[in-house]
Image (spheres, coloured by chain):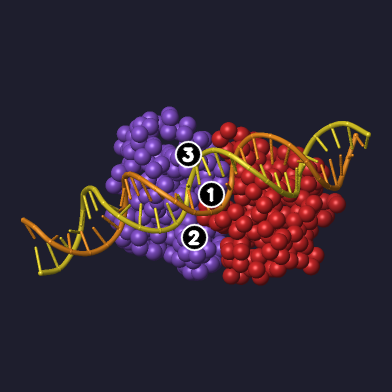
Chain colours: A red, B purple, C yellow, D orange
Amino acid sequence: MDKAAATSILLKRLRVSTNIDEEDQRAINALPIALKQVRDEESIVSTGDRPSACCLLVDGFIFRSKVVGGGKRQVIAFHQPGDIPDLQSLYIPVLDHDVTALGDCVLGFISHAPLRALVRHRPNVAEILWRDTLIDAAIFREWICNVGHRSGISRTAHVIFEIYTRLKAVQRTKDKSFQFPATQVLLGEAVGLSAVHVNRVMQELREKGLLRFERGTVTILDEAKLKDVADFDPLYLHLDPAL
Amino acid sequence: MDKAAATSILLKRLRVSTNIDEEDQRAINALPIALKQVRDEESIVSTGDRPSACCLLVDGFIFRSKVVGGGKRQVIAFHQPGDIPDLQSLYIPVLDHDVTALGDCVLGFISHAPLRALVRHRPNVAEILWRDTLIDAAIFREWICNVGHRSGISRTAHVIFEIYTRLKAVQRTKDKSFQFPATQVLLGEAVGLSAVHVNRVMQELREKGLLRFERGTVTILDEAKLKDVADFDPLYLHLDPAL
DNA sequence: CGTCGTATTGAAGCGTCTCAACGTGAGTGG
DNA sequence: CCACTCACGTTGAGACGCTTCAATACGACG
């Protein structure tokens, strides 16, 4: 895993739009990226930090979380390769949540200065990055609905189906299964359920033949039914930038 | 309420940063804004729409919502004058939620074309607008925590304290009270509680001497205690752009 | 081979929901 | 100006989803 791999992931992500021209690509290629390995559960940036770089997730998973009254933790997002989980730090200096590695992963740090310069001089790139943060927000909105109005089984199915859909979009699923090293405890922190209840929900999902969730790998057994139980409509992911 | 008033609200909002220069202000002043009155509960834009303009809230309140399985509605945001609730439509063509008037209000529509041109030629303005959408996202994150991990009374206190804090920041509160024409049903849709339970929570908040919520006006009785019950930390609002 | 994190199971408790009834005030038409 | 209506707020009672606590099982790892 080297700098070229990181640049390639970034380019792939930005090139979803046809607006990127050769000049833009050259500028992106010229971007300095500092690679770093982090291990499972390792903190990347935390609440109150004022980072001077953004972090591109090159390989592995990341989650973002906030601490809610009395020390409980709410997971607010899961990220996959290609995502820049703290892109907002470019324009909001103080971080209002924590970013943590979910399993071992590879990061590429891009300093704010060159990134800001890129955004200033390459409006096409700026638009795509802005758009990326807007989709981030769209996912947050869906998560509000998820924890706000769906039942335990439905919301659990929903987060998993979301991850599945996003991974499939970048060819990171094998058949109907994918790696996802979250524990039931962490999943509970994401959907606002106790770990005990997540466990019961998982059993129900398994018994109903919808999915298996075991030791870091998820297998979708019945995609249509799962989507139905999850009350999942992919519109909010805005996967096709033309739409 | 005329176009000058709308432009003034917009300028005030954008000028939070010292980065805006005279040239930027001229460009903002030149922006065509079409005023429109809408009445309580009237739909402004809906899921699936492809708006060709963004809407600046000039006076009144707006809420955004999504429909969750089986017709239930989740309110995902409340907006106040100066906000542009559908700014994201500038770069995400299809809307993934509904935008509705909360009480009668005055809107200023700004077409995408001149807004995109402004963003292209005035990077200072682009940054502030981008920042605005990032703060929007920060508020969504906090709402996930709210519905995910807080008790009924705490989450209800939290939304109200958030509105209070944001209104105070733009001098739209009188002493410790402000206008807010939401019903208990709508509030329930925002915090993920039934209307019946919101009612009971409101009684508890009143009995504890924390706040009164009556016919469109909210009065904060004990700011410190309410903040405590709400588990409220204003960091996520990023009110001071210098921080 | 013991230890520790994770998954699993059971049972009791409670926060919130649902249903259903009733109160209240504002607006409307006769 | 009264009677009607309707939306909103309020109250009570029973049901249920989920939590908490506590104990056990399992598997990875030093």
Q: Disc 3 sits on a residue from what chain?
A: B
Q: B16 above or below A144?
A: above
Query: Pointer 3: what residue?
Result: B154
Q: Is residue A171 visible?
A: no
| Place of residue A63 in the rendered image (x, y in percent of width and height, measured from the top left) | 69, 47
Give the amino acid at mark 2.
Lys
Q: Secondary structure at mark 3?
A: helix
- Choose mark 1 or mark 2, whichever is in front: 2
Give coordinates of residue A47: x percent, y percent: 62, 37
Q: Between residues B150 and B107, which one lies in front from this camera angle?
A: B150
Using the numbered discs, state the Cα–Cα distance from disc 1 to disc 3 in whole angstroms.
17 Å
Circle 1 residue:
B140
The residue depicted at 78 percent of the width and 43 percent of the height is A40
Picture residue at 59% right of the left edge, 70% below the top: A243
Marker disc for residue B66: 2
- Which quarter of the image is occupied by the C terminus of chain B? top right
In terms of sequence position, does the residue under pointer 1 or pointer 3 come before the other? Answer: 1
Along the viewing direction, whichever of B20 and A108 lies nearer the viewer: A108
SS for callout 2:
strand
Ranked by sequence position, the earlier of labels 1 and 2 is 2
Between circles 2 and 3, the one closer to the viewer is 3
Q: Nearer the viewer, residue A7 or B137?
A: B137
Alpha carbon separation for disc pair 2 and 3: 23 Å
| In the rendered image, residues at marks 1 and 3 fall on the same chain | yes
* Residue type beneath disc 3: Ser
Q: Residue A34 vs residue B10: left or right?
A: right
| Residue B233 in sight | yes
The residue sitting at 61% across, 64% down in the picture is A229
Chain under disc 1: B
